[in-house]
Image (cartoon, rainbow, N blue to C red):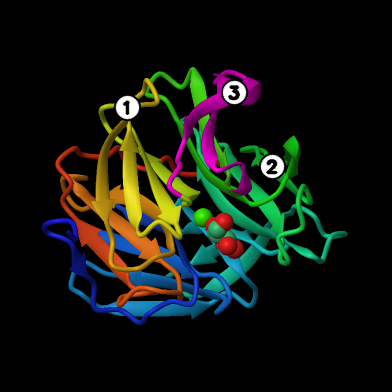
Amino acid sequence: MVSPQLSQLPVPLAALGEGPCWDPAEGALYWTDIPAHRVHRLAADGTHTSWDAGQPVGAIVLRAGGGLVLAAKDGFWTLDPATGELALLAHAEPDVPENRMNDGACDRAGRFFAGTMAEDESPGAGTLYRLGTDHEVAPVLGGVSISNGIGWSLDESRMYYVDSPTLGIDVFDYDAGSGTIGNRRVFAAVGGGAIPDGLAVDADGCVWVALWGGAAVSRYGPDGRLRQTLEIPADNVTCCAFGGPDLGTLYITTAAGPGRCAGALFACRPGPAGLPANPFRG
Ligand code: BGC
Ligand code: CA
C-alpha cells in the first residue's frame, strides 16, 4: 500500500531529482535535477521557478548569509535565487572531469560535506570532501563509489554516511570541534535488493533513508533497527528532507525509472518531525 497522505507535488518530473532543501525563511523547497543542470524551487504560494546551473548539481544547502550553496560538478558554487547569479566558492576536483559531486549536507558549525562519484559509477573513484567556512576544501574519505546521504546524530557525536554500493548506512565517530571522522562501521544494512541513497535525521534522532530501486523511504532508530517504511510509487527514490512550517512534512525526490510516478516530487506527513537543515556558515 502506498503511504497515507502522500501527495505528488505539481512540478515537472525530474530525470534525477535530488537534494531537497527546505528554506524556513521563504517557506520554500529547493531541489535539483542533476542531468538537467537545474535548481528548482517551489514557493509557499505554489509558484515553481527553476534556474540553469550550467552543470550537474548534486546537493543544495542554504547559506547563513543568504542564498544557496550548490555542490556542482566541478565544485562548490553560490546561487542567488533573487538574481540567478552563480559564483564559484571553491573547486573540488578540477583535474577529474569524469567525476561529479553528488549528495551533501552541513554540520551544525556550518561545514559543507559533499562527495563525488564517477559519472560511469566506476568503483572507488570518488572522494568525500569538507568545505570549511574559510572556503578551504579538504578530502575526508577516499575510495568512495557513489557518495550519498550524510547526516549527524542529535549530539553530533556520530556522522551517518551512505556510499550506495555498500548497500548500507555506515556511521563514523564525529569530532564536531574539528569536523573530522573516524572509526567507520556499519549502522544498518538496507536489504531487499534496494540501494541506499539520500538520508535525513529527524528530531528523535532516527535516520530516514531513500531507497533507490526500493520504491520506499525507511526509518531506522538510533540503534540501527528498522522502525517504519513509507512506500513511494516510483522505484528510484533518491533523497528526503523535512520541511514545512512545523518541519513535519517529509519531501521526497525520485528519478526516472519504473513506477507510475517516476521522477515526481512527493510530500507526506510521516508522524515524526524533522530538524531544520544546517546552513553553510562561510
Ligand atoms: C546518484 C545516482 C545513482 C543513485 C543510486 C544517486 O544519488 O545521483 O547517479 O544512480 O544515487 O546509487
Ligand atoms: Ca543522492
Would you say 266 lies left or right of 36 here? Answer: left
Seen at 31% across and 75% down, the residue is 261
In the rendered structure, does residue 176 fall within the stretch colored magenta? yes
Of the image marks 1 and 3, the number of the one nearer the N terminus: 3
User: Which residue type does callout 2 highlight?
Assistant: Tyr
User: Which residue type does callout 3 highlight?
Assistant: Arg
Q: Is residue 267 above or below residue 83?
A: above
CA separation, marks 1 and 2?
27 Å
Would you say 63 lies left or right of 206 here? Answer: right
Q: Secondary structure at mark 2?
A: strand
Of the image marks 3 and 2, the number of the one nearer the N terminus: 2
Say if residue 140 shows up in the picture.
yes
**Residue located beneath label 3 in the image:** 185
CA separation, marks 3 and 2?
19 Å
Would you say 154 lies left or right of 69 here? Answer: left
Seen at 25% across and 51% down, the residue is 230
**Residue located beneath label 2 in the image:** 129
User: Which residue type does callout 1 highlight?
Assistant: Gly
- Is label 3's Cβ within 8 Å of ligand 1? no
Q: Secondary structure at mark 1?
A: loop
> Magenta residues?
165-192
CA separation, marks 1 and 3?
16 Å
Name the residue furthest right: 95
**Residue located beneath label 1 in the image:** 221
Seen at 68% across and 42% down, the residue is 128
Of the image marks 1 and 2, the number of the one nearer the N terminus: 2
Give the image location of residue 124, x and y in percent: 77, 47
Could you say which is closer to the camera, residue 208 or residue 44? 208
Count neighbours of disc 2 (C-alpha within 10 A) and say few if under 14, some if 14 to 19, many if 20 or more.
many
Q: Main secondary structure of the magenta part?
A: strand
